[in-house]
């Protein structure tokens, strides 16, 4: 069967342009490829165009808009997911500008499709007491419980993204006076963060029990699945949800309405901020490219807001407790007079 111009360009986009020319990570390439799997599914189901028959002439602004609407209405995708899919399509349209210049106006029309505004989500994070409660839930008398205890502790202590955690191997740790972990983040950016002494002790016990301190195991997954490969993102999320639900039954007031893997990262950042650690250091710890991203924690911290307000001319509004007491005494006196007369 003859290969279409769409298939040829898409193959070059994923095989050459994204990984080689743009230096995109495997995770980004994987996410972008899922977008186009969904686009082909849409074209087949709604437009009656078979995947092997899709041509560049079928890739239009109107169809992309219809596809984005289909994602939200038929698949129930959130606005943020819809925007992520559009980002992948924008990238492909940008690529086509230089590979198929005769139809540049079409690609520019696709690139003109706007990112949809979405309401900002409330940041879900745990207090220090909430973290402690959650970490008390795994049954450390069992091997699985000990693994989950170390996994949750490392997720918080390192502020790792879930993919960064999944990708960890024993070789990423440097056990020294200050133990550090090497995290491979977004855009293949590497950062090295220190770990607390208690987490290091738990980690070493776990690694020793699993034989992960042996020289021939240094490139094995730190948290393997039953087949010996990496845990999936969903597997880690299920672990988090399991203990979140357990903790919620123990003390619902300490648990937020929802909790995801990223909530541990938010929690660590908030606790660092509330411990008066400089925002620049928090930025580097989290692997943000700019403090502008990190400032979201300063805006979300209720404790910091209260501290700032306390410094703002304290004593302007006086405590009138004594006056209220006098008023209540006066009212009682008047009522007593009414009873007498």
Image (cartoon, rainbow, N blue to C red):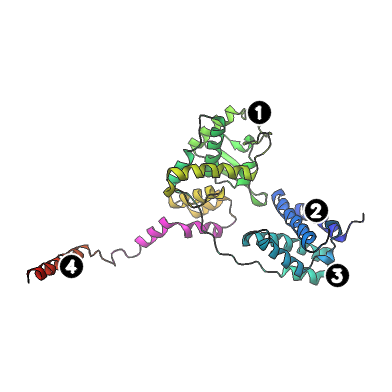
The chief SS type of the magenta part is helix
**Mark with earlier residue (2, 4):** 2
Q: CA distance from mark 1 to mark 2?
A: 36 Å
Residue 24 seen from this side: no
Q: CA distance from mark 2 to mark 3?
A: 21 Å
Q: What residue is rendered at 42% in x and 45% in y?
A: 251
Image-based side of 215 in relation to 158, left or right? right
Residue 257 seen from this side: yes
Residue at image mark 1: 215
Q: CA distance from mark 1 to mark 4?
A: 79 Å
Discs 2, 4 touching: Cβ within 8 Å:
no
| 141 lies above or below 78 | above
Q: Which mark is residue 259?
A: none
Quadrant where the N terminus is found in the figure: bottom right
Span shown in magenta: 289-316
Residue 129, how many percent across, how many down?
Answer: 42, 45
Q: Which mark is residue 327?
A: 4
Which mark is nearer the camera, 2 or 4? 4
Q: Secondary structure at mark 3?
A: helix
Residue at image mark 2: 16
């Amino acid at each position: 069967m003859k290969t279409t111009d769409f298939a040829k360009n898409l193959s070059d986009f994923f095989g050459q342009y994204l990984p080689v020319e743009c230096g995109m990570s495997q995770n980004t390439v994987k996410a972008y490829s899922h977008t186009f799997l969904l686009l082909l599914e849409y074209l087949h189901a709604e437009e009656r165009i078979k995947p092997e028959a899709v041509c560049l002439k079928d890739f239009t602004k109107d169809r992309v808009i219809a596809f984005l609407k289909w994602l939200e209405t038929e698949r129930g995708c959130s606005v943020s997911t819809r925007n992520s899919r559009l980002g992948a399509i924008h990238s492909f349209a940008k690529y086509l500008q230089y590979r198929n210049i005769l139809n540049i106006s079409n690609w520019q029309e696709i690139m003109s499709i706007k990112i949809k505004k979405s309401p900002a989500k409330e940041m879900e994070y745990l207090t220090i007491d909430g973290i402690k409660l959650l970490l008390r839930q795994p049954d450390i008398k069992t091997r699985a419980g000990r693994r989950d205890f170390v996994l949750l502790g490392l997720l918080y202590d390192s502020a790792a993204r879930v993919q960064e955690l999944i990708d960890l191997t024993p070789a990423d740790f440097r056990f020294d006076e200050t133990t550090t972990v090497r995290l491979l983040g977004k855009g293949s950016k590497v950062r090295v963060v220190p770990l607390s002494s208690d987490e290091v002790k738990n980690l070493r016990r776990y690694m020793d029990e699993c034989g992960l301190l042996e020289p021939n195991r240094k490139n094995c997954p730190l948290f393997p699945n039953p087949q010996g490969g990496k845990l999936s993102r969903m597997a880690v999320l299920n672990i988090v949800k399991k203990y979140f639900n357990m903790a919620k039954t123990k003390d619902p007031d300490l648990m937020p309405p929802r909790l995801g893997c990223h909530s541990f990262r938010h929690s660590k950042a908030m606790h660092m901020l509330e411990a008066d650690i400089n925002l620049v250091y928090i930025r580097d710890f989290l692997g943000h490219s700019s403090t502008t991203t990190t400032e979201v924690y300063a805006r979300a911290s209720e404790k910091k807001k209260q501290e700032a307000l306390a410094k703002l001319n304290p004593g302007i509004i006086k405590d009138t407790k004594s006056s209220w007491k006098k008023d209540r005494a006066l009212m009682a006196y008047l009522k007593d007079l009414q009873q007498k007369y």
